[in-house]
């Protein structure tokens, strides 16, 4: 009897502070998630970390945010890093899937205009063991975004990858 190997995805959210990452096998199994701060030479350091994640987790698909989507604003450095990650994955013959912020919110909240915090709450409810303790308090207008939100960005990409019916 041959067992079907579950599809493993690695979702990476390149951000100003570094990277958020999530590894999932199927729509209900969160294997790993976290964030990695990159302090010097951010693009080279981030690319090196993505390479390590891919070698360690051996995903079938790399999921990235769609930085060219109309609803997305990203710094030029992040767009350059994104292009380098996509090109590198292509050389490794790794499938790449781009998902926009609107797609993440629509898939997880049923409302493309939902908030980032609402997405994080939804994910903490879906994966309570892995994420509930990492959910930061709701951000107030005078507060900077909590670095832990990078984790929720990546897990949101990973969760939005899967079809609704499994």
Image: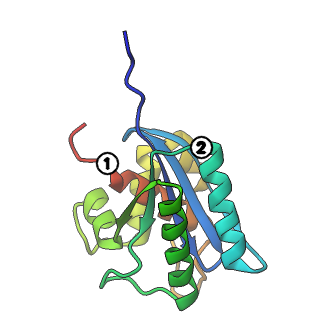
In the drawing, what numbered circle is on residue 162?
1
Residue 52 shows up from this direction: yes
Residue at left offset 42%, top offset 70%: 116
Q: Position of residue 54 (x, y in %)?
A: 59, 51
For label 1, the crowd category at 10 Å Cα-Cα, with few meaning under 14, some 14 to 19 and many 20 or more, is some
Q: Position of residue 43 (x, y in %)?
A: 66, 77
Q: CA distance from mark 2 to mark 1?
A: 18 Å
> Viewed as shown, does residue 29 lie left or right of 44?
left
Of badges 2 and 1, the one in the foreground is: 2
Q: Which image quarter: residue 110? A: bottom left
Asked whether, in this view, residue 44 is left or right of residue 70, the answer is: right
To which residue does mark 2 refer?
A: 57
Judged from the image, the secondary structure of the residue bearing numbered disc 2 is helix
Quarter of the image where one finds residue 25: top left
Residue 117: x and y, percent? 44, 68
Viewer-nearest residue: 123 or 101 = 101
């Amino acid at each position: 009897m041959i067992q079907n190997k579950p599809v493993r995805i690695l979702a990476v959210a390149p951000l100003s502070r570094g990277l958020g990452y999530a590894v999932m096998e199927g729509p209900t199994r969160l294997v790993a998630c976290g964030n990695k701060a990159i302090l010097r030479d951010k693009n080279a350091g981030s690319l090196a970390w993505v390479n390590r994640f891919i070698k360690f987790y051996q995903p079938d698909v790399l999921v990235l945010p769609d930085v060219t989507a109309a609803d997305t604003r990203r710094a030029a450095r992040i767009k350059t890093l994104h292009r380098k990650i996509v090109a590198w994955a292509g050389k490794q013959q790794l499938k790449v899937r781009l998902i926009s912020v609107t797609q993440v919110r629509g898939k997880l909240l049923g409302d493309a205009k939902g908030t980032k915090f609402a997405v994080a709450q939804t994910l903490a409810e879906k994966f309570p063991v892995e994420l509930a303790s990492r959910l930061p308090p709701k951000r107030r207008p005078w507060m900077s975004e909590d670095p832990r939100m990078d984790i929720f960005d990546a897990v949101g990409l990973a969760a939005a990858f899967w079809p609704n019916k499994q």
